[in-house]
Image (spheres, grey):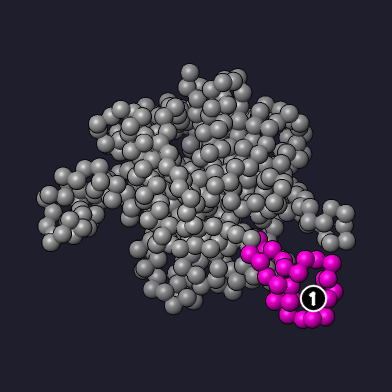
Amino acid sequence: MKIGISSIHFDVPKIYLPIEDLAKERAIEAAKLEKGLGLQRMSFPDVHQDVVCFAANAVIKLMETENLKPSQIDRIYVGTESALDSSKPLASFLLPILAEKFDDENPHCDVVDLTFACIGGVDALQNCLDYVRLRPEKKCLVVCSDFAKYDLSSTGEYTQGAGAVAMLIEAHPKLLSFPLESGVSSRGVFDFFKPKRSFQKRQILNSNVAADHFSHYEEELLVAREQPVFDGQYSNQSYLERVKEAYYDLKKQKASNTPCYKNWSLILMHLPYCFQARRMFWQLIAEEQPELNSSFQGATEADKWKAFSKSEAYKKIVQEKIYPAEIASGKVGNIYTGSLFLGLLSALYFSAKENQNLSKHTLGFMAYGSGAKAKVFEAEVEAEWKEQIKKTNLFETLEKAQAISFETYKDLYLKRTNKSVLPVKNEVYLKRVEKENSTTYGARFYAIAN
C-alpha cells in the first residue's frame, strides 16, 4: 500500500524587503546577492505575525481545500527551530485555532514538535509516514514553520525569511508516495546552533538601582535569542559531508550500482539560500562519477572539477533538475525546516505550469540540519499530482506580496513599532501576549480575522 503526501499548502509573510535595497544599505554589490546567491527578496513577518500564525494559516488552507475537519486528523507533528516556549509546542497552539475555525475539535489528536535545526520537518514527515503505514485508515498533518532571523549586518542577514508549509499524510496519496529506504548521516558538530547565552544582570540592566530592583531573579540570566551562532563555511562543509554520507547510505540500501541522482527527475535540497544546491551538487557528482572530469582541462583535479561545475553538461542538470525548486526560494528566503518543502512545492508548481508529465517519475530529496544530520530519500509522483499542486496558487500568491522600505524592515526587526504594515485580513493573527501582572504571564493568544 502506498503512503505519502496528498496535499501541500503554504503561508509566508505578505511583505518583503527587496534584496537590492538591503545590498545598498550594507554596501554589498547587489549582483553578488542576486546573481551569485540567487536572492531576490527577503520575506519578513509583520507585527501581528509569528510562526504559529504561519503554521495555522497553512493548515487552514490545506483543510479547506481538502474539505477536512480537525476530528479527521489523528496527528499534527510540527518541525521547527523557532519555538516560542521552552515547554509548550507550536503544535498545541494550533488546536484551539482549528477548533474555532472549523467549529470542530479533536481532543484525541496527538501533537508534538520535532527540533533538529532545518531537518526537523523531515523527521516529522518520516515519523508520520511510518505511523500511517501501520494505521492506513488514519490521516496526519506535518507542518514546518520557522522564522530565519540573523544578526543585523551579519553574513546571514540577507538569507532571512519566514513561513510555513503544511502537508497531509495518508494512504493512497494523490501527490507523492515514499518507499521505506532512507539514507542518514549524523554527527555532533557546532556549525550552527542557538544556545542559551548567559549575562550578568548588571551587564543587561546597566544600572545598580535597576539590578537591585530585580534582586529576586538569579544573578546570572539565561537569554534565548532568535539569532543563531554560526560559521557559514564550516556549515557548508558539514552539509556536503553529511549529504554525501547519507546519499551513499541510500545507494547501499537500494543495492544499486547506478548513481541515484540519474533516476531523479527533480532534485530537492535544503536551501539556506537560493543557489545552495547548484553550488554544491556538482561535488557529489565528482565523487560519484570521477571519470567525468577527464574531458576538462586543468592543472589539478580541483581545477578540472571547477571547469565541470561551469560546463554546459552541469548547467543542463541544474536547469532541468535543480532550478525549478529555486524559484520560490529566491522570492521568500530561508525558512529553515520548510525550505526543502517550499522547494518541492516550487518544483512541482513550475512543472505543472510547464505542462510536464511527472506521473510515476522519481524525485530525490537531500535534507540537512545543522548540528548535524542529513537524510537522503526518494518519492514517486502520483497520477493526481498536477491537480493537487495547482490548488496552491504558489507563484500568483508570491507576486501579491508588497515591498517595504529598509527603515520599515529595521523597525520590525528591532520591534520598535506595534503597528502592522498591512491590515490584518483573512488570516490568523497574534491577538495578545499576557503581561507580567497576569497569572498566565507570557501566554500567547490568537484570533482569526475575516
Q: Which of these two is toward me, 243 or 129?
A: 243
- Asked if 8 appears above or below 202 in the picture, the reply is above
Residue 192 point in image, percent of width and height: 50, 58
| Kind of residue sitting beneath label 1 | Ala
- Residue at 42% x, 42% y is 185
Residue 99 included in the magenta stretch of the image:
no
**Is residue 6 in sight in this rendering?**
no
Residue named by callout 1: 211
Which residue range is magenta in the image?
A: 197-224
- Asked if 20 appears above or below 228 in the picture, the reply is below
- Residue at 33% x, 38% y is 248
* Residues packed near mark 1 inside 10 Å, few (<14), some (14 to 19) or many (20 plus): some
Residue 371 point in image, percent of width and height: 50, 52
Residue 406 point in image, percent of width and height: 55, 72
**Is residue 201 in sight in this rendering?**
yes
Quadrant of residue 203 within the rendered picture? bottom right
In the structure shown, which secondary structural element does the residue marked by tag 1 occupy?
helix
- Residue at 40% x, 66% y is 33
Q: Which of these two is toward me, 226 or 393?
A: 226
Residue 411 as seen in the image, left or right of residue 254: right
